[in-house]
Amino acid sequence: MQAKVTWSEGLTFEGQAETGFKVPLGASLSVGGKDDGFRPMELIAIGVIGCTAMDVISILQKKRQDITSFTVDLEASRAEEHPKVFTDMKITYQIKGNNVDPKAVERAIELSETKYCPAQAMFADVFPIELEYEIEEIE
């Protein structure tokens, strides 16, 4: 994989990876930025839940689960002192659908955690990651 960031001015950058898509990077006003883009740690968080979300929805679709809405939320704590690394994460899978099987959801989450999601696996040995899910039946 290749990626790069290109500086514009101040603390404003543009990130780009092999796919060619671009993402704005910026810093908050409190540290001299213009509040004009994603913070790098935000992108790491989105990467983790994006990775597991793609795994889980793909597995649930293969298991023929009738999913009408799917969201993955992340709450992370960070160290108080620099480099202000993540110290723990809680990932919540919110699933809406018809007759969704909780065992299918649990298995999909387990497979993502233990086999498929490299982003989650990368952090699993570094800090605790709590996983939970909520299923809402659509009537």
Image (spheres, grey):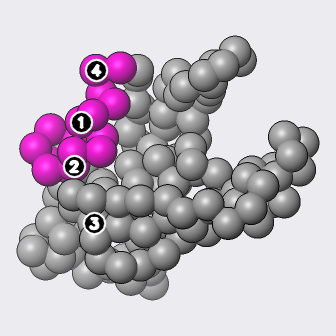
* Mark sitting on residue 117: 2
Q: CA distance from mark 3 to mark 4?
A: 22 Å
Q: Residue furthest right?
A: 30
Q: Quadrant of residue 20?
A: bottom left
* Mark sitting on residue 121: 1
Residue type, mark 4 in image: Asp
Q: Quadrant of residue 108?
A: bottom left
Say few, some or many: other residues with alpha carbon within 10 Å of mark 1 (under 14 / 14 to 19 / 20 or more). Answer: some
| SS type, badge 2 | loop
Is there a contact, CB below 8 Å, between mark 1 and mark 2?
yes
- Residue at 35% in and 59% down: 3
Region rendered in magenta: 111-126
Question: Mark 4 or mark 2: which comes first in sequence?
Answer: 2
Residue type, mark 3 in image: Met
Residue type, mark 2 in image: Cys
| SS type, badge 4 | loop
Say few, some or many: other residues with alpha carbon within 10 Å of mark 2 (under 14 / 14 to 19 / 20 or more). Answer: many
- Quadrant of image for the C terminus: bottom left
The residue nearer to you, when weighing 61 against 100, is: 61
- Determine which residue is flagged by label 3: 54
Magenta: main secondary structure equals: helix
**Residue 7 image offset from top left, x and y in percent:** 61, 60
Say few, some or many: other residues with alpha carbon within 10 Å of mark 4 (under 14 / 14 to 19 / 20 or more). Answer: few
Question: Mark 3 or mark 4: which comes first in sequence?
Answer: 3
- Quadrant of image for the N terminus: bottom left
The residue nearer to you, when weighing 116 against 29, is: 29
Q: State whether residue 137 appears in this view.
A: no
- Residue at 57% in and 35% down: 76
Q: Residue furthest top?
A: 81
- Determine which residue is flagged by label 4: 125
Q: CA distance from mark 4 to mark 1?
A: 7 Å
The residue nearer to you, when weighing 62 against 5, is: 5
